[in-house]
Image (spheres, coloured by chain):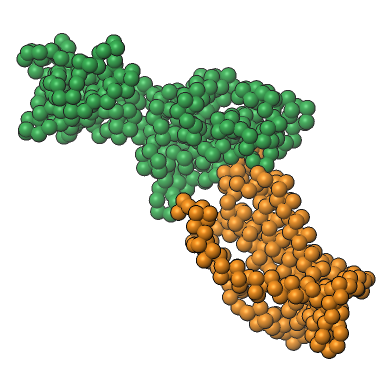
Chain colours: A green, B orange
Amino acid sequence: MTKPIITFENVTKRFGKLAAVDDVSLTVNEGEFFALLGPSGCGKTTLLRMLAGFETPTEGRILIDGQDISNVPPNKRPVNMVFQSYAVFPHMNVADNVAYGLVVDKVGKAERDRRVEEALELVQLGGYGGRKPDQLSGGQRQRVALARALVKRPRVLLLDEPLSALDAKLREQMRTELCTLQEKVGITFIMVTHDQDEALALATRCAVMNKGVLRQVASPNDLYEFPNSRFVADFIGQVNLFEGVLAVDEPSHAVIRSPDLPVDIFLDHGVTGARGGAVWAAIRPEKIELHKIEGEAAPNLGDAPTGTNAIQGVIKHEAYLGGSSTYEVEVLTPNGGGRRIKVQRSNLTRWDQEDFKLGETVWLCWHACSPAVLLS
Amino acid sequence: MEQSWKQAKAVFAAALGPPLAWLVVFFVAPMAIVWAYSFGHNAGLTQIAITGTFQNYARAIEPLYLMIFLKSAWVAGLTTVLCLVLGFPVALAITFASDKAKTWLLLLVMLPFWTNLLIRTYALIAVLRTEGYVNMSLEWLWKGGGTLAALAGLKPFEPFQPLELLHNNFAVVLGLVYVHLPFMVLPLYSALDRLDKSLLEASLDLGAGHLRTLFKVVVPLALPGIASGVLITFIPALGAYLTPDLLGGPDSQMIANVIERQFKRANDWPFGAAMSFVLMYLTFIAIAVQGLLAKRTPEGRA
């Protein structure tokens, strides 16, 4: 199951002095839907283009099925790409577009026609062979690009920002379809995206890059719940970051004291690898509960000592998003300043959100297992 | 400026008036006069009687002149094809050059425009004539080879015979290609530069080599640019006057040289006028053909 299909070995790509990709080592396994995720200019596209053969690594090697392909030209590689602009040939009809790669491979006419129709059926464009690209919608053009790449039966399919040019509704639909398609054809997919939602929803594994460096490679779940750095925690989803020091660090529990919070953050596990100095507690907005209990008793959730993991604050901003609402709650810091904390709350009933209005005093609390501790 | 011209007729008239008057006085009126001349005959040394005769046109398509028309079209066609063959790789190279190099390369292509055509043509004469730079270089090489042959104990070479490079059809075509190459390169470049480069990458990605990519993707998509380059080269080449006059021999005169002779030495303005209009009609036909071709390949224009 975990047979490596692509290996990057210490790959560096420099454009002039700038290292677009800096010493990246990475393995993608057979059958994975792998996402390269990062802000624009992080080197993810360069990595993909090196895999396709449009760029050559300055240093390091790229292996496909154990074979070094670093210097193999793009037309001799067992990978195919779906371009961000789709790059559907405007002067050919849909069938000729899809057949292009097969004509190059000298596949016989009868088999070619069969495989083209098969590929078009696969992307739900059966019967569209005679259309010209300018008669198709953006989504349909993308399907043509997909069919054109898949009909070659590549070892790996590369997708460059596959959903970025589609409107929101279509994007949602295409996400599901890409997943289904990948399961159906069983080909390894590698996708480049700057959209974390897209990566989390589609990929079986993600690599997060920043400034040419690989920051973390993990499953979407692990990336979100167990980020390894402030960059990853902040890039994937929303997060509240509290800088502090480890006041207590026992194997069974730990306490982080932050100058940003009037209370300590209690953790139900010890921190490994901390060498003193600053640490950061990352708490996702949806993991903070919002309560309207009157009186002075802290609504601690019961898994932390009294006086930790619960604070009083005032709602300073609210945004109603339909399914949920997000709030910014200001709490008093020990030095008298204010610190806003992002909270997300599901609207469980139809009048739920009416309890939490702008300017109201509320209680925030979280479980002892909710904060992620970051050392960098 | 949402107004249409209908709401601001005075402004529109003021803006349009002067150039329109200019065109009427200096372009339409002279053309009309020449057109009228083409239906007349000489009625004295300076008098032209406009009689509505078609005799001049009948003479213009006599075999003698028809051959010159055909020959001009052939020379212009050859020039266009050579310009296309030479210009396409140049345009392609500029398209793929770095942004900095692009500016300089385009400048180099346009640089000859800033020099007078007459000077450029005389410079070409200096290169091509019997004692010109080409023959000088060849002679130097020939003598060097002869010396080497003598050293190696071989029979010495015959004395150097300079090549006849000037005052023939070769010189005319060479001169026309030289003058018109920028006309071809620039429209080709603008067509190729607009091409989505990911289309070329997609072709390579699908396994095609560079040649297949060139002929199956680049050329079909650059067709509108090729068509306008061909037209913009062919039309001035067809009416070329200075180049065949200076570089050509007695048998390489083109239609413009014949027309010039009618107006000057032969003093037969009506016949010159008729031939001018035949030339213009040929040009119109070329433009119409290009228009039809452009309509047939609409998707390449985006």
Rendered location of residue B68, percent (x, y):
86, 72
Left or right of A154? Residue B141 is right
- Seen at 52% across and 59% down, the residue is B9
Q: Name the residue nearer the viewer: A134 or B166.
A: A134
Q: Name the residue nearer the viewer: B224 or A105.
A: B224
- Seen at 42% across and 28% down, the residue is A199
Q: Name the residue nearer the viewer: B22 or A121.
A: B22
Rendered location of residue A119, percent (x, y):
65, 25
- Seen at 40% across and 27% down, the residue is A197
Say which quadrant the C terminus of chain A sits in: top left
Asked if residue B287 is positioned above or below residue A8 in the image, the reply reads below
Rendered location of residue B52, percent (x, y):
86, 72
Left or right of B62? Residue A212 is left
Q: Residue furthest right?
A: B63
Q: Residue furthest bottom?
A: B45
Res. B245 image quadrant: bottom right
Q: Is residue A282 visible?
A: no
Asked if residue A42 is positioned above or below residue B135 in the image, the reply reads above
Q: Is residue A302 visible?
A: yes
Left or right of B188? Residue B251 is right
Q: Name the residue nearer the viewer: A354 or B212.
A: A354
